[in-house]
Image (spheres, rainbow, N blue to C red):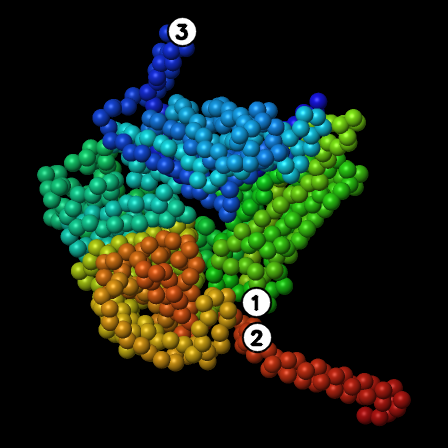
Amino acid sequence: MCAAAVGMSALVPVTTFSETTVATPATVDPTITDPAAVNADAATAPAVVESSPSRDVKLSFAQIAPAPGSMVLRGSNPTGSVQFGTRSDEVVSKALLNLVYTPSPSLLPVQSQLKVYLNEELMGVLPVTKEQLGKKVMAQVPVDPLYITDLNTVRLEFVGHYRDVCENPASTTLWLDVARNTSLDLTLQQLDVKNDLSHFPIPFFDARDNRQLNLPMVFAGAPDSTQQKAAAVIASWFGARAGWRGQTFPVLYNQLPDRNAIVFATNDKRPDFLRDYPQVQAPTIQMINNPEKPYLKLLVIFGRDDKDLLQAAEGIAAGNILFRGDTVTVDEVKSLLARKPYDAPNWVRTDRPVTFGELKTYDQQLQSSGLEPASITLSLNLPPDLYLMRSNGIDMDLKYRYTQPAIKDSSRMDINLNNQFLQSYNLSSSDETKGLLLRLPIVQGLLDGKNEVSIPALRLGAANQLRFDFQYMNPMPGGTIENCITFQPVKNNVVIGDDSTIDFSDYYHFLAMPDLRSFANAGFPFSRMADLSDTLIVMPKDPTQGQVSTMLDTVATIGGQVGLTGANLKLTDDPVEMQKHDADILLIGKIPEKLKDDRHIDLLVNATQSWVKTPQRHNELASVRLDDDERQPMAQATVSSKGPMAAIVGFQSPYHDQRSVIALMADSPRGFELLNDALNDSGKRAAMFGSVSVIRESGVNSLRVGDVYYVGHLPWYERVWFALSNHPILLSILAALSVVLLAWVLWRLLRILSRRRLDPDDE
């Protein structure tokens, strides 16, 4: 009888959903007769107080591993996996896997099975019965919480058979479809965490938590500019760590939060629930219990005055690696080296070639294995103002290794950029690449390839994904039942070399503005300096909670995009300061009176009344380019309504030609909620472009209206080409005239040479 092929599956793209888990109290199994075994299990299980707070969580596969479709397990690729993380301050006491799947109607009952593993421990086996074939099946598999750790993998392995002998593992009849609504039910209990800053930022931020970071900031009252800057520095630091999760910072005035939070308190101005705490003599950071809910923690930023609060905040950004105990004092923070433009840690360097090893986000990112190896992907985040218009392509020196195909066939590696095919390379057999084995003697059985690839420049954006697909023509069993050919397929290994390089150096920085897409997706122009040293934030006097929250969310989002704390931002509530700084301006709440009459403003929100200018031509696609005359305002409409609305408006700074103004406005507290939600939603950010984005309950709508200006620098000859690129007819005429002129010059030159040859005395 032919054995079914055993293949290594591709890992399903996953995200770590941090619904906390560690372990639960040991339960005595009545089948165990050895008391020592029971005692051993009990000794390793952490104690959980039965009265501690608990919560029930349902994690669907759609949440844990967002993907366009369901998980399909096949004969040649029989395994699928998802991962979920667990927080440090919670423990899982109960866990249940609710499986929803559909087996192929061609499977052999009982011989076909679905095995469920948690962290490589078998949790259960589900045989496929005759009644289940071709129908949706719902099954529950108990999961032992004792095997749940900080990062957990649920692996499903499909054992499929469609006939007794001479099976082909690649047969299209071998499949089992796992639905996206398959879920994990978890009961989580809160742990009483010790007040110890050596674990900071836990529990205020846990990297294993896949949820959006929700961290309230508490003030005694409306914070002044210095307190707001201190909060902004801390929010930016947390945003840089939250990254793709997103974050929100609700602001409370003199109110005790209902979750882990950060509190700002000076000796003279502090929330009522901290009135009894002793005064401090230096910038102090202390971790304490919530007075009403001891399982929750407060990170209190104490200071004698507001300057101490700012120094403590800077201490969190620069010196948190030294934190320990429940209290630390920040004695001094000083800057040793200034940042350079475009040096954001999350951006690809543009001053030299960059290796793929520098771009990895986890150890095994550049390798894969299996009968059908999973795609290898690499993210390339670029400054949005990188000028690539006249570039023929970006050079990539690619080095890769792979298991040699058994025979010369059509096995190949495909390279894709942003889901667009670029190029394909054949995977050679040993006869053609035998000599390359000498280059990698430590990697037995693998071949080495090196190719230079040119990436089309115009297909690049601020955020890009480079994907490598290795596709093998795997030999499979064949023949008839009487003359069966059988063998055991082996997995293929593929590796992209860490020393592969990509080169974005020697390119100019130049961008047409206003461009809200660059702001929404890359924090530009503020992110040009990753520490926000060229950013001036203008806040209203006596800001509302929603306005402060919007400011914190915005700087945190930029921190997540660049991967660095905006420790050097400038913040003021005096609009006069805008004229004194050569900086990009971020306006929160409202546009100052000094700018309201500026002709560049295309939308204004003032309480329940708002007005907007509409262009001569509008297109919903951000990629469609409009001429300058098509962007000119055609009409201005003024509307009054009590419904919530927010807006993002971009225009050129009236004080510096190379600087920009981004205004974040809303007409109500609900409007600021809509604004904050939109900035944290990748789908809504994708709808932001042009000079105006209007945010309502229905979603985001954008306009390209008003004048265009340019930031950055191009040499004069590049500026000429850039100007001509907008006028192809003129470019064609000039090209034709240039050809005619060149032909005439050559003709005259040849006539002169001919004359001199025929008559040397002719001058």
Tell me where residue 539 sits by quadrant.
bottom left
Q: Position of residue 602 (x, y in %)?
A: 34, 74
- Viewport quadrant of the C terminus: bottom right
Foreground: 223 or 66? Answer: 66
**Residue 283 position (above or below residue 558):** above
* Residue 720 appears in the picture as rendered: no
Q: Position of residue 495 (x, y in %)?
A: 62, 39
**Residue 168 position (above or below residue 573):** above
Mark 2 and mark 1 lie on one chain; the one further toward the N terminus is 1
* Residue at mark 3: 33
The residue at 56%/28% (across/down) is: 130
* Residue at mark 2: 725
- Between marks 3 and 1, how big is the CA–CA gap? 75 Å
The answer to whether the residue labelled 2 contacts the one labelled 1, judged by CB atoms less than 8 Å apart, is yes
The residue at 57%/63% (across/down) is: 458
Report the amino acid beneath label 2. Ser
**Badge 1 element:** loop
Mark 2 and mark 3 lie on one chain; the one further toward the N terminus is 3
* Discs 2/3, front: 3
